[in-house]
Amino acid sequence: TTDQPTIYKGLAGVVVDKTAISKVVPETNSLTYRGYAVQELAQHCSFEQVAYLLWNGELPTDVQLADFSRRERANRRLDRTAASILAKVPETCHPMDVVRTAISFLGAEDPAAEDPSPQATQAKALRMLAVLPTIVAADMRRRRGLDPIAPHHGLGYSENFLTMVFGEVPDPVIVKAFEKSMVLYAEHSFNASTFAARVVTSTQSDMYSAVTAAIGALKGSLHGGANEAVMHDMIDIDRPERARDWLTAKLDAKEKVMGFGHRVYKNGDSRVPTMRQALQEVSAHVGEDKWMTIYAELEDEMFTRTGIKPNLDFPTGPAYFLMGFDIPAFTPVFVMSRITGWTAHIAEQAASNALIRPLSAYDGPAQRPILVR
Ligand code: SDX
């Protein structure tokens, strides 16, 4: 037949399902979680409040938040077996491989791994949210030749994580900027990693398998890995006066500039202004304006030459660097936040499931016989 089906390469523009978790409106440059504008959430709410919102549909009352926080704090410890397994993962691998292995192992350990009930789903999501910072911090310290620091139950989510990484609670300016990045990274509708998690869930596989797949998808440089690539590029540029020539050479070579462009936003990523300001605050606090200057030069030159604007990974890369994180830890930090969105989508997919199984248009050889000699 000559009828060729329409192919939606990369599923671009295809609406696959409904979701009540977040709404992206590219035309008005707006992103809401459960109806709340993300920039307002970043300004006024903690990451714990946003996690609660994504999972439960409403912001918590004080009593609900206290209970949520108590349960989160009670789940921060990594058990000894898991810790010893992760200590054996080669340091030559990318830290995302450690995080992926960790979630896979937690699934193997959890007797409730296969329990699809809403209560078990909630418990598993909370466990992953609470223990991921312990895993990411321990791996970062291991690579620096340092012993892990146990979670501190008296500290909030971000303060505890930053203390497990750096050995002390950083200045409130740093904590607030970090917290904003966590709120902004938490959820973004049917992005590649979330969709991967939904595909796995649609087969009635378990939640840890779905999250493991999502981590694999997030690792790539066209998705979450871009925040690391951005910082490598900025270090490569090194001097602000070189930024515009660097960009010209990149575009002339037809290479993608990391941290720019977006599948959905064509007029700018709605999360960028909030994180750009956070980067500015961190730069001022640390007393280092080089990266902010390179940022501004690249942003301006890229827009002049291509009309393309930065995505969220562009400001978070240098912000995390200035906070003191090692570059390969940037995407694992993204995981710590996006675990909230992933698990909300896993629950939503399971609650109104249809197996995700698209079609393909075959363009290989026509049917032919095996020539038996
Ligand atoms: C994230 O989906 C999500 O929501 C993801 C995310 C989330 O919260 O989950 O927002 C997080 O993953 C952000 C994206 C991080 N990735 C990068 O920064 C990598 C660099 N960006 C690009 O490769 C690109 O913009 C994508 C992958 C983000 C989007 O790619 P699309 O939608 O497939 O678009 P495309 O690559 O086909 O580009 C369309 C045009 C092309 O030019 P033409 O061939 O039409 O002339 O725009 C150009 C591209 O060459 N273009 C770029 C560019 N991005 C697009 N050119 C140079 N550098 C870029 N970054």
Image (spheres, rainbow, N blue to C red):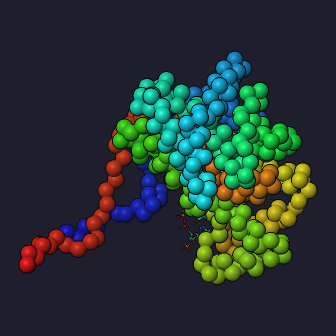
Percent from the top left, x then y, of residue 315? 74, 56
Q: State the image coordinates of residue 119 (x, y, percent, origin top left).
A: 49, 23
Above or below, 278 relative to 258: above
Work out which residue is located at the far left of the displayed protein and give it. Answer: 373
Compared across the picture, whether 72 is left or right of 11 comes to: right
Camera sees residue 81: yes
> Front-most of 184 and 138?
138
Q: Residue 165: horizontal and vertical position, in percent?
A: 75, 44
Image point 53% across, 42% down: which residue?
Answer: 103
Looking at the picture, tell me which residue is in the foreground, 29 or 101: 101
Image coordinates of residue 17 in percent, x first then y, are 43, 43
Compared with residue 355, is residue 126 higher up or lower down, i.e. above or below? above
- Quadrant of the image where one finds ligand 1: bottom right
Residue at 91% in and 56% down: 287
- How many numbered tags mark residues here? 0
The residue at the point 66 percent across, 64 percent down is 229
Please state if 248 lies on the left or on the right of 290 as rendered: left
Residues 9 and 137: in front is 137
Quarter of the image where one finds residue 21? top right
State whether residue 29 appears in this view.
no
In the picture, the quarter occupied by the N terminus is bottom left
* Residue sitting nearer the eye, 190 or 168: 168
Q: Quadrant of residue 311?
A: bottom right
Q: Please identify the quadrant where the C terminus is shown.
A: bottom left
Relative to residue 68, is residue 301 drawn left or right?
right
Residue at (25% x, 67% y) in the render: 3
Query: Would residue 300 be found to the left or right of residue 200 on screen?
Result: right
